[in-house]
Amino acid sequence: MNNNTAHNIDKSPYKIVKKQFFLISENDFILQTGERLEDITIAYETFGTLNAKKNNAILILHALTGDSHAAGVYDKKDEKPGWWDIMIGPGKAIDTDIYFVICSNILGGCMGSTGPSSIIPGEKNSYNMNFPMVTIPDMVRVQKRLIDHLKIKKLLAVTGGSLGGMQALEWSVRYPDMVEAAIPIATTMKHSALSIAFNEVARQAITSDPNWNNGNYSKEKKPDIGLSVARMIGHITYLSDKSMRMKFGRKLQDKNDLPFTFDTKFQVESYLKYQGEKFVTRFDANSFLYITKAADYFDLEEQHGKGSPVDAFLNAKARFLVISYTSDWLYPTHESKAIVKALKKNRLDVSFCEIKSEWGHDAFLLPDKRLNKMIKGFLASVYEKIQGATNNEI
């Protein structure tokens, strides 16, 4: 089925899911900066059924511009399922006939969770740039509250790609007794100067837009041009040189157009403009600023190992499956190998695979039999071990 076309829900393989909301109503949530954040709402979705032993739960952690809608559709009018529907569902790599899957929108997001566009408690105005700086550890601590709310004491696995992989790593070292297995994909322990540089240029595109107005823009007059350019910049880093050559090359939109003008002539130009324009209809510019900054500040080595990657994983107990891609130049394979090296020096159970792919950083979001097979087999092995241990205790 073509995911970009409408479908009949009665004949569709997609499951109908519902967005849910969890409220942290107490005002005792202290962020890493020391600031207090009140009345935090977290949007989340679940797929599958939590078993009686509550030992089949998997937490999916989304990337920079993702959300809680990881799989399925909301209703029969939906034309496209969740962002990782290729992986999550009955009989798929993350099999919802076996596992109970949870995915929440991160703190600072704009898809139902508390973020810069949220209304300040007790007031009429939104936070905008008065929203406190949040970090990836803050995001994970909020997710921990959600898991506690669901009365799950231990997660079978945590997994995600890119920013989601950073969260998976944070989970493994911050809450080692709650994580049986971790699958960080196409990720890093800390951003390189190159990654920070691209994020900063994207942020500058937003803040240089006159409509940004120091973050105090209206729904009717948003910094759409700046956000669109920011998305275009980011999207280039998600692809690879080979994939762009294969898909676009130097192809023109229309060979009959007059040459030598500043109009959009090349197909790759048109593609990037389309991605940027589509993005502004669903994402908040201030959220983009906050989340990219949180990614830049993330440093697992410094925060948990005082500068040592080995010491960062001293408390980790999970089994690990670390995955990278040959054509990912945003988070290249050597960054995943650094994670693997640190894990092995701590004598942890770790498997590693570099998948050959020409599609760049975003390859983990595309159909791939190798990725499916690895994750399916790894999860089955972890679950079988858990089931055996539980049965022996009875």
Image (cartoon, rainbow, N blue to C red):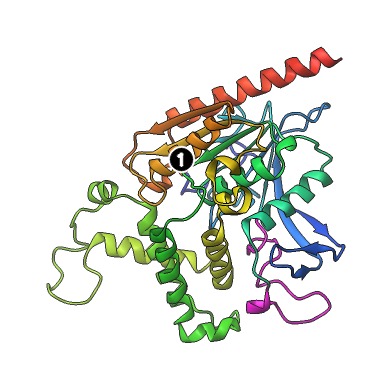
**Which image quadrant for residue 10?**
top right
Magenta stretch, residue numbers: 106-131
Residue shown at the point (47%, 35%) measured from the top left = 323
Q: Where is residue 73 in the image (x, y as percent from the top left)?
A: 62, 46
Q: Examine the residues drawn in magenta and state their main secondary structure.
A: loop
Q: Position of residue 98 (x, y in %)?
A: 68, 26
Is residue 184 inside the magenta stretch?
no
181 vs 5, nearest the viewer: 181
Callout 1, which amino acid? Ala
Q: What element carries label 1?
A: helix
Q: Where is residue 209 in the image (x, y as percent from the top left)?
A: 45, 82
Q: In this view, does 313 lie above or below 66?
A: above
Residue at mark 1: 338
Residue shown at the point (68%, 27%) measured from the top left = 97
Relative horizontal placement of residue 297, taking residue 179 as reference (left or right): left
Residue shown at the point (58%, 68%) measured from the top left = 290
Quadrant of the drawing holding the C terminus: top right
Q: How crowded is mark 1: few (under 14 residues within 10 Å), some or many (20 or more)?
A: some
